[in-house]
Amino acid sequence: MFRSNDRWALNRQSESFRATRTELALLLVATGCATLADRFNSHALTALSALLYGLTVIAGVVIRRRRARAHWQAHRDAAETVKSLAWQYMVHGGPFHSAVPDPEGLFHQQLEERLRPLRRVGWQEPSHDPGIPWVPPSGQQPHDPRHPQITRAMRAVRAQPFAARKDIYLRDRVLDQLGWYGGRAGQAHRSATAWSTLTASLTLLALAAAVARSTGIAANWDLSGLLAAAAAAGVAWLETRRHHPLSYAHELVREGLETQRAALTMSVPEDQWPQAVAETEHLMSPQHTDWLARFGG
């Protein structure tokens, strides 16, 4: 279920970004044609501009009906829910502590409870993966057909002693996510800086073009509208990709994970391990990241 939803989330994310990029590009080209039509008094360019504006409206309607962004977020939440529950099951974290009588049944119950709100908003478990189907290795195939999401590898980790489970969790989950969040925070910061610089430059150029036209230096050209439209498209793209808030959120999650990693390594006894794992998984949840991103915008 994780791999299926992960692939669909990536597919829908790409579709959402492509659709927004296409809509912004159509608007920008239409504005450019309108500017040239005004300069050269061209009826053909005026007609082309009107056609492009019409295509932009149609593209917007199609985008809204496809709801790619909503589907992307739903599949991402489902994928991360399954992944988090799988890790908690494996290392005896959260509700899957060592004394629980039926961890497999509890896993199924917890999974259904977490997925129920997503089903209410239209999420459905993908019937097939986009692209080439993924065939799991033998260790990742389910051992019990009653619980198909629990693999042999997951059961093998759960059967390990506390010290081994702790080492596996710290190495393969926490350190892996530390690297991921650190890399994404840096990437988002660089992208935010580049796009902010570009939009500020375009805005200044639009101001310069308006001043030049008003003073008669470039009376025959009105580029301020085109440059302002380009700056607005840059701002819209920056907001779509959420580089600023995600850079802030990912860096805070990375810092929280680093603190949690030190605590898990040094001072968490076995009886407090389930709660500590649950707190660590909460730090990595999409809902927590989205909550932090609200304050980073």
Image (spheres, grey):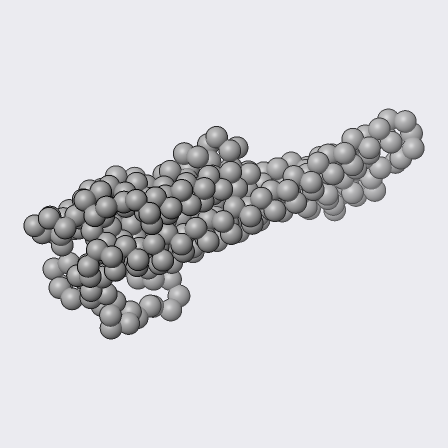
Q: Is residue 286 left or right of residue 203?
A: left
Residue shown at 52%/42% (left/top)?
247
Q: Is residue 112 left or right of residue 196?
A: left
Q: Quadrant of residue 175?
A: bottom left
Q: List x then y, in percent, for residue 172.
A: 35, 58
In the image, residue 210 above or below residue 244: above
Residue situated in front as seen by the camera: 175 or 16: 175
Residue situated in front as seen by the camera: 154 or 52: 154
Q: Is residue 39 left or right of residue 235?
A: right
Q: List x then y, in percent, for residue 278.
A: 27, 43
Residue shown at 13%/64% (left/top)?
144
Residue shown at 58%/38% (left/top)?
236
Residue 285 appears in the picture as rendered: no
Residue shown at 74%/38% (left/top)?
201
Residue situated in front as seen by the camera: 70 or 23: 70
Q: How many marks?
A: 0
Q: Which residue ends up furthest to the bottom in the rendered image?
A: 138
Q: Is residue 108 left or right of residue 74?
A: left
Q: Which residue ends up furthest to the left in the rendered image?
A: 101
Q: Which residue ends up furthest to the front in the rendered image?
A: 266
Residue 97 appears in the picture as rendered: yes
Q: List x then y, in percent, for residue 92.
A: 20, 51
Q: List x then y, in percent, for residue 176.
A: 40, 56
Looking at the rendering, in which quadrant would you find the N terminus? bottom left
Q: Quadrant of residue 231?
A: top right
Q: Which residue ends up furthest to the top in the rendered image?
A: 214
